[in-house]
Amino acid sequence: MGSGNCNDSENKLSTRNKLSLSKKVKEASIHGCFLFNGLLVILILIGIFALLVWASIPAFKEISIKEFLFSFNWNPTSYVKPSYGILSMLVSTLMVTIGAMIFAVPISIGTAAFISDIASSRVREIAKPVVEILASIPSVVIGFIGITLVGPYIAKIFNLPDGLNAINGSILLGVMALPTIISLTEDALKGVPKSYTEASLALGATKWQTIIRVRIPAAASGIIAAVMLGMGRAIGETMTVLMATGCANAMPTSFTDSVRTMTSAIAIELGEVAYGSTHYYALFAVGLALFLITFAVNLTADIIFNRRPKL
Amino acid sequence: MEKNIIIKTKNFNFYYGDVKALTDVNIKIEKNSVTGIIGPSGCGKSTFLRSLNLMNNLILSARYEGQIIIDGEDILHKDIDVVALRRRVGMVFQKSNPFPKTVFENVAYGLKINGITNRDFIDQKIEESLKGAALWEEVKDRLNVSAFDLSGGQQQRLCIARALAVEPEILLMDEPASALDPTATLKIEELIQELKKKYTIIIVTHNMQQAARVSDYTAFFMMGKLVEYNKTNIMFTNPENKITEDYITGRFG
């Protein structure tokens, strides 16, 4: 019966193909249309990468790659001797990102475990959209909160003149990374086979022990990928860090220092730089470095996520 | 006889929402015996087994009436400590479900959640449990490999070892050999004969020959009711009910 049906449809298909050429053309054009759209995304990615490389090349005629990567001094507007080292802003970016993860990862895993394993279905239906709404808050609003709310508290706690520093940026970026990490961690936890949970409970483990010792470890690779994607988001974020970190152009020595990340350096300086100057091209080179970092982070996340054992 | 009874149910009824899955089950299970539970698919045999360690509590719509008395204590009472109960009533599942951890960690899990950290004690207990599950000789040199590297039959015996490590009194087995090949099945069946010296075993099985081979008592369930319950040799040679006879002779299934 099954094979009969199959033959029928094959027959229909072949007669249709023979009969109407116009349909064939239509199929082909739809196919082409989707193929074009798919390729377009790849082309855009390659185009952006090419543009960054292209615009960065002139910078390296004036700047040695060694200076660019390993010098702490970024002072392109000096009259005496301009310097173009990105190390301090690279360190600033990493500091703020790592700080954000220290803040966001425990909260995210806790929230995700709560939503997927503990909350009643009614609470879950409220909590999930709330997390998603968090993702839709404009970054400028988060920056605003950093200046008016988080900053003053940090200043008070650490006894500083103001609270615009790496801690502030870390907290805000952490908040911004929460929705990504929470949603993906929750997916990872949901993917843990029920049989593990049952095995653990049947051995007399409490719900809490089961979550901590079985479910979260079993979801580890998904959670790591979630964290890396949240990290990718934090590294590239601009407006919030621009507003909340003070943007001092110097090598940071602690989390209470004001920092200028790669993103905020580009945002601040690109508007005022002379077109075609070395400084102008150097900013593209910073952009290229940033692109490579986020690309590597996202790619790693993707590989970890796809290599996770299919349970 | 009454003194040796470890599990006793009184008019036990079980519902999934509005659907009644078990009706007035009355059964007495003897200590250190093997009780086989047989019956057609959907007859409630797994539901009954999973009631004995309150595993059905994970299902939101689950509801029950009556009594299940284990060691003189009604486990359906609302004040029962489910965690403590499950330590006394271990379970082995149909599909072997080791954790994605090493062989060692799998067996040690039950000890660690009980707060045992003494390494020597854990080592000794792991050896004991793996020996108890007839797996020690095969894995003693690879305790640190992933449990997933073991064969299907070994994984199932690992799950048995894991259950033994917490020293239960009762071991529930839900078709423990249904996913295994005949050789691995035979090993599990031999193991059950060994285990009944120390534990009370209740085994759900689809396979009537298996029930005949391993169990001292057999319970036949049909449409949520306990149709017949007797010594296995009596049940299989001289069943009281016509319907039992029809089932065990393979007239329906």
Image (cartoon, helix red, strand yellow):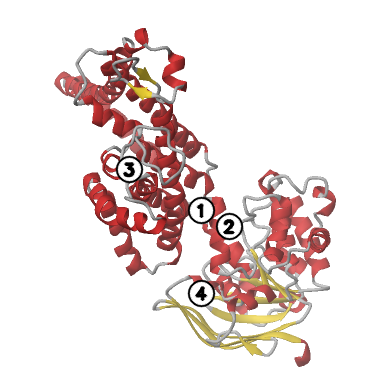
Q: Is residue A86 left or right of residue A275?
A: right
Q: Are marks 2 and 1 in contact (CB under 8 Å)?
A: yes
Q: Is residue B207 left or right of residue A250?
A: right
- The residues bearing labels 3 and 2 have C-alpha atoms spaced at a distance of 39 Å
Element class at badge 4: helix
Please identify the quarter of the rendering in which residue A263 is found.
Answer: top left
Query: x%, y% of residue B209?
Result: 72, 64
**Residue A1 in view of the camera:** no
Label 4, on which residue? B57
Chain hosting mark 2:
A
Do the residues at pointers 4 and 3 share their chain? no
Label 2, on which residue? A214
Label 3, on which residue? A245
Residue at the farthest front position: A80
Nearer to the camera, A24 or A224: A224
Q: Is residue A306 left or right of residue B70?
A: left
Q: Are marks 4 and 3 in contact (CB under 8 Å)?
A: no
Residue type, numbered disc 2: Val
